[in-house]
């Protein structure tokens, strides 16, 4: 993802890349970040040291790297876009505390299409939550075989948003096996599929007696996530301190 962010930012005249940061053990340190990204050289070496002055930081790494990123941005009063998933509760609390000092955009998915689909899912749940016979919600997510967390942060966010529209007593059920009995009326089911090099696909099934609605959003490559992160970075310029999400970036009501 870092490579795609560098590549797309290099083509955007509104951006000037001043640093590309990775861990100190990366054997590619010192090489031109543009070349590492498969793009033309940009005169910025891949490094583990942070620059002194930047307008915004995009973190698209791993949970293990996020704490230092947050601390560095807070110390330098630098706006931050957090696109890293799989965060612990402690890290989420740390982000919320940091947002009292700097502006932060944080979302489990940077995809503009995913976030618009989340809004559509909210509307379906809000409209049909009390439908005669009940509304069943199942979330199926597909990702590449290398993804470490399951279900995806995006799937969990879909469930969180839908659950808030349905009931405070919504149960979140992960997979099914054996004699489970009849499906309860207040559960949301999650199913994680790991196949090949799938960059990300989510299907939200709203089942009713006699009909159904399926919302499907799928990435064909990772550029949609990089483009969304860059859009968030642009939007964040000049914003006051606070915790924002991609609904804010898209101008949708949270």
Image (cartoon, helix red, strand yellow):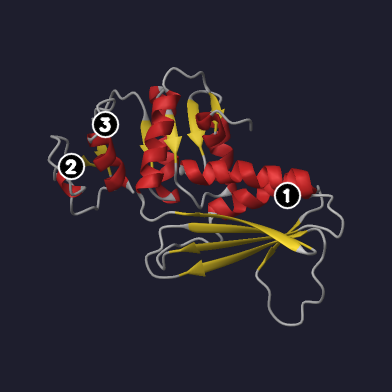
Q: Secondary structure at mark 1?
A: helix
Q: Earlier in the sequence, mark 3 or mark 1?
A: 3
**Alpha-carbon neighbours of circle 3 within 10 Å: few (<14), some, or many (≥20)?**
few
**What is the C-alpha distance between the residues marked 2 and 3?**
13 Å
Residue with the most extreme bottom position? 178
The reply to whether the C-beta atoms of the residues labelled 3 and 1 are less than 8 Å apart is no
Vertically, is 58 above or below 155?
Answer: above
Left-right relation of 172 to 21: right
Residue with the most extreme front position? 210
Which mark, by number, is residue 34? 2
**What residue did someone put label 1 on?**
163
The residue that appears at 70% across and 47% down in the rendered structure is: 124
The foreground one among 215 and 54 is 215
Q: Earlier in the sequence, mark 1 or mark 2?
A: 2
The foreground one among 156 and 54 is 156
Percent coordinates x, y for residue 217 in the rendering? 51, 53
Q: Secondary structure at mark 3?
A: loop
Q: Earlier in the sequence, mark 2 or mark 3?
A: 3
**Alpha-carbon neighbours of circle 2 within 10 Å: few (<14), some, or many (≥20)?**
many
Left-right relation of 186 to 115: right
The residue that appears at 24% across and 31% down in the rendered structure is: 17
Percent coordinates x, y for residue 84 in the rendering? 45, 46
């Amino acid at each position: 993802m870092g490579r795609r962010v560098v590549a797309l930012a290099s083509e955007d005249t509104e951006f000037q890349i001043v640093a590309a940061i990775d861990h100190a053990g990366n054997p590619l340190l010192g090489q031109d970040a543009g070349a590492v990204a498969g793009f033309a050289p940009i005169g910025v070496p891949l490094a583990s040291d942070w620059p002194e002055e930047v307008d915004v930081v995009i973190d698209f790494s791993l949970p293990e790297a996020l704490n230092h990123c947050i601390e560095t941005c807070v110390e330098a009063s630098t706006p931050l876009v957090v696109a890293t998933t799989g965060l612990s509760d402690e890290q989420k609390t740390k982000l919320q505390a940091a947002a009292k000092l700097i502006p932060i955009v944080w979302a489990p998915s940077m995809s503009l299409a995913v976030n618009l689909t989340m809004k559509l899912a909210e509307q379906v749940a809000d409209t049909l939550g009390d439908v005669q016979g009940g509304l069943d919600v199942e979330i199926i997510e597909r990702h590449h075989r290398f993804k470490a967390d399951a279900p995806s942060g995006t799937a969990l966010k879909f469930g969180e948003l839908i659950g808030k529209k349905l009931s405070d007593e919504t149960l979140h059920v992960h997979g099914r096996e054996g004699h489970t009995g009849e499906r309860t009326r207040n559960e949301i089911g999650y199913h994680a599929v790991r196949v090949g090099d799938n960059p990300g696909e989510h299907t939200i099934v709203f089942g009713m007696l006699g009909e159904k609605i399926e919302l499907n959003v799928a990435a064909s490559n990772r550029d949609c996530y990089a483009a969304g992160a860059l859009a968030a970075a642009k939007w964040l310029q000049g914003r006051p301190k606070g915790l924002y999400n991609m609904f804010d970036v898209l101008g949708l009501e949270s």
